[in-house]
Image (cartoon, grey):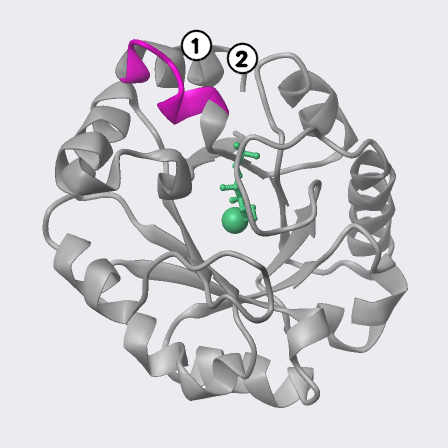
Amino acid sequence: MVKLAPSILSADLSRLAEQVALIEQGGADLVHVDVMDGAFVPNITFGGPVVRCLAGKTALPFDVHLMIEHPENRIPDFVTPQTEFICVHQEACVHLHRVIQQIKALGIKAGAAINPGTPVSMLESVLGDLDMVLVMSVNPGFSGQKFIPSAMVKVSELDEIRKNEDLGFVIEVDGGVNLDNAPALMAVGADILVAGNAVFGAADIPARVKEFKAIL
Ligand code: DX5
Ligand code: ZN
């Protein structure tokens, strides 16, 4: 069963708990938390204090996507009883293997993300250590961008590798995901779909989540 992780980057952040309650009501599986530092990506969003405030306000697990430089200095900030995944960018980690072990040592599932310009092969040495690979289907920094089709090829490449090598990581796709491209992403092996604008941009947010869940 493919999971839906709405991204709160597109939510009305002045009413964050209420907005998360709406996706929970619709049947979302995870809350995707986009952390941006204004250095690794051009935008700044929120940090650990916001995520810790949200813990306990929803029953949904957190899927934390760190788009920050030196994530190793910040990982403990995002550990809450609800944090299921912490994902760092391959491009932001000189010592990616060490950062993955750091996340796992905190009892959290570890993910590594690759930008549209980064090939799957950059993760080859750590695929056996990962719980998640996040394929970016837009250049990170903003919601509401257009899906970059080469992401589809990367998902299918990763799916083939995990089958051939009997690996257990899940594949998440993030950026420009909508009701139209979701079926094709599922067909090539995606396990978790992130959707920002396609969920929080809807007039009826729980109904939109239900529409996604009906096709996943
Ligand atoms: C992009 C973020 C995404 C973004 C997705 O930098 O990592 O999670 O919020 O938003 P949409 O679905 O609108 O592209
Ligand atoms: Zn994200």
Residue nearest the observer in this picture, 128 or 184: 184
Q: Which residues are magenta?
A: 198-205
Give the numbered dot on residue 211. Answer: 1
- In the image, what residue occupies the spot 33% across and 81% down? 76
Residue 49, picture quadrant: bottom left
- Percent of width and height locating residue 116: 79, 50
Q: Note whether ligand 1 is within 8 Å of mark 1.
A: no
Determine whether 148 is above or below 113 in the image: above
Residue nearest the observer in this picture, 161 or 195: 195
How many neighbours does mark 1 have within 10 angstroms: few (below 14), some (14-19), or many (20 or more)?
A: some
Q: CA distance from mark 2 to mark 1?
A: 7 Å
- Percent of width and height locating residue 15: 15, 37
Q: Can you see residue 20?
A: yes
Numbered disc 2: secondary structure: helix
Single out the mark in the foreground, 2 or 1. Answer: 1
Determine whether 28 is above or below 78 in the image: above
Determine whether 75 is above or below 41 in the image: below
Residue nearest the observer in this picture, 190 or 31: 31
- Percent of width and height locating residue 152: 81, 35
Residue 193, picture quadrant: top right
Q: Is residue 67 magenta?
A: no
Q: Amino acid at mark 2?
A: Ile
Numbered disc 1: secondary structure: helix
Residue 118, picture quadrant: bottom right
Position of 21 with respect to 155 (left or right) is: left
Tell me whether the residue at label 2 lies in contact with that at label 1, contact meaning CB atoms closer than 8 angstroms.
Answer: yes
- In the image, what residue occupies the spot 54% across and 20% down? 216
Counting labels gives: 2
Residue located beneath label 2 in the image: 215
Position of 14 with respect to 103 (left or right) is: left
- In the image, what residue occupies the spot 23% across and 36% down? 20
